[in-house]
Image (spheres, rainbow, N blue to C red):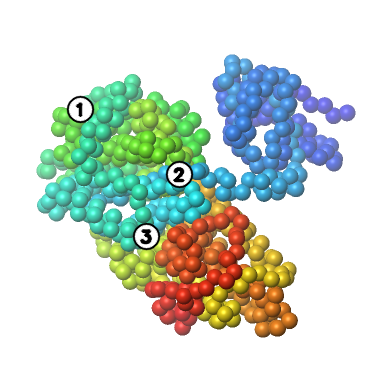
Amino acid sequence: MITRAFDRSAMSWSYEMHLQPMLSATDIEGLPFGSVFGSVPAHTVSKRHAHQDGEMFIVLAGKAVVVLGDEERELEPGGVVYLSPFGYHEIRNESDEAFDIVSIYWEHIPSAVKALEEAPPRGALAERTLVFCPPPTPNGGLHLGHLAGPYVRADMLVRALRSMGRDARYVTGTDDHQSYVATAARLRGTDPADVATAEGDAILATLRAAGVGCDRLTRPTGDPEHADRMRELFARVASSAAVTEEKRETAYCPTCDLSLHQAFARGACAHCGAASDGEICEACGRPNEARELTGLQCRICGTAAVTRPEQALWLDLNAYADQLRDYLRSAYTSPDLQTLVERLLDEGLPPYRLARTTEWGVAVGDGQAIDAWTDLALTFLDAARAESEQGGPAKITLFLGYDNSFYYAVLLPILAFAADLTEHLPAAFVTNQFLHLEDAKFSTSRGHAVWADDALAAAGPDAVRLALLRNAPEGRVTRITQERAGQLAQDPLYVDAQDWLGGFAALTEQSGGQVPGTGAWTDAHREFYRYLNLTTQQLDGLLLPESFSARGYVRLLESFVARCAEFRATEEGLRRVPSLAEEARTSLALEYLAAKVFAALAWPVVPELSQRVWDWLGLPAQPVREADWSFLPSGTRYVSAAPDLGAAAAPAADGRS
């Protein structure tokens, strides 16, 4: 006889609840399930998670709400609930007593596979999505390192969502009130507003040239009502009990008579030793106060900094630590971002200064202006609020560089809590690291850069987008060589797609200049058609914020083109046999269908080439991404034998075209 007893002293902490092993195949040979005792403490929520197992809870004591996806059930002693494979679930115990259960779980792979089939990735995409990107700082032009971060990747998602019939909008702008604009103006001997306007115009022109379409632009210096809206939101934040007015020692340059913060301050991070400006270290992502930097100097004149007392409003970030943890539990955060934020929360969040002694920005009296990062966060919330008022609720996905993690995953949410604008926060954060040129970061000051405008002019937007998406710094630092940067049009997918698409000239001649209807099918035809649909579903899965991967998308698309080329090569013999004319019709119809599928799947990556293929097929408007692919109408005639490849038709270095 084997017995087990519920014993709190024998429990360990896992899944944000107490667990104790019960019985499994380790204890009883052949037992087809595992089991544990579990206890969720009072006023606690267990970890939201999913697994391939089926699971059943039997309630022993207490009362709590069990959540499975969008369903909720309150359970009491004697209650039983079944949780299906891959269903996200948690236990929310809002009572004053522990919620004790027995959990029985088992693996049944057919059920797990069926659960995946019944929940295709497209079904998890919201009907309306706002895709936000941090507004670039208008103190200079964009290089390939900038574009490789959030901007092209976010546009890829927006295009894909629209091709599925979803309402998706791209929101960005220019971060006009950054201290980097003010320092650039001082160093150039001009006005910050002029710098913000001129450089901002150039940045937006570069984004347009790269095929990045913006649906809402936030440009503070060109918006006469921006300052008033920011002051209104700032007042809401300032009214929080977590905000106090204090006099603190602040870094100062006596030579320039400047309060040193952010871009005005330059030194080394006290945590990791990397070169850092004030308030944030790009290398380790930790916030700081400029006066904490070692070897601190004035960015303008190089004078060693001193300190002086300054009166300002300070926000106690720690007062919202628990609320921030709860929010980040419900939102998706990339692993690198999650690691950083959890470390910051464990160490204790520093207070944050809400207004700076500066002449640049939204003035709030006493010679101070709203802190640039506070201004940026409030601008984000203001734009999200406006989008919601005009178009209705939407899921917000934020693409951002890892170096801005503190500002967007800590400061932004806490300001939203203080201003009571929580409903306008992101539901998902998708980060990027840095793209390096050779073995070092792109650097404007050192001339270590490939300018986006130059690359776009030389290779065209499709080639630039494809190269940057292939090398996207997702979860890691990636590198591109100077040689590769000069040969963007030689990307394997770009070249192979040209080869395959150019081959339609011969096919059109075989089919008499029109698309045939299907005839008899072979097993190979059936499996190729299955492949077109399954690959579409795989690519759909890479568009979920939780699994978003531009790199993975490009590689799978590259495999798709190779598979289509192989299908053509193996089918060519069949098409020359008169007795297989019916099979040949199906073969050709599948080829033209593959071109349609390519145009839709590749449109987020290479929009110009994809649009030309779509137009050549006689299809209306922009590419549409079907869940189950329908054939082109038989008898469709073409104005040309093959799609116009445009700039893509230039001969490749290896002789292919």
Task: Tell me the distance, in whole angstroms, between the alpha carbons under discs 3 and 1.
Answer: 46 Å
Tag count: 3
Q: Position of residue 329 (x, y in %)?
A: 51, 34
Give the residue displayed 29% in from the left and 44% down from the top.
218
Q: Position of residue 365 (x, y in %)?
A: 16, 29
State which tag comes first along the sequence, 3 or 1. Answer: 3
Mark seen at residue 129:
2
Task: Tell me the distance, in whole angstroms, between the alpha carbons under discs 2 and 1.
Answer: 41 Å
Which quarter of the figure has residue 281?
Answer: top left
Amino acid type at image mark 3 = Gly
Say above or below: 643 vs 192.
below
**Which residue is identified by label 3?**
211
Say above or below: 483 vs 435.
below
- Residue 476 in view of the camera: no
**Which residue is identified by label 1?**
311
Q: Position of residue 345 (x, y in %)?
A: 44, 33
Amino acid type at image mark 2 = Thr
In terms of depth relative to the viewer, which is nearer, 325 or 195? 195
Q: Residues within 10 Å of mark 1 (few under 14, many from 20)?
A: some
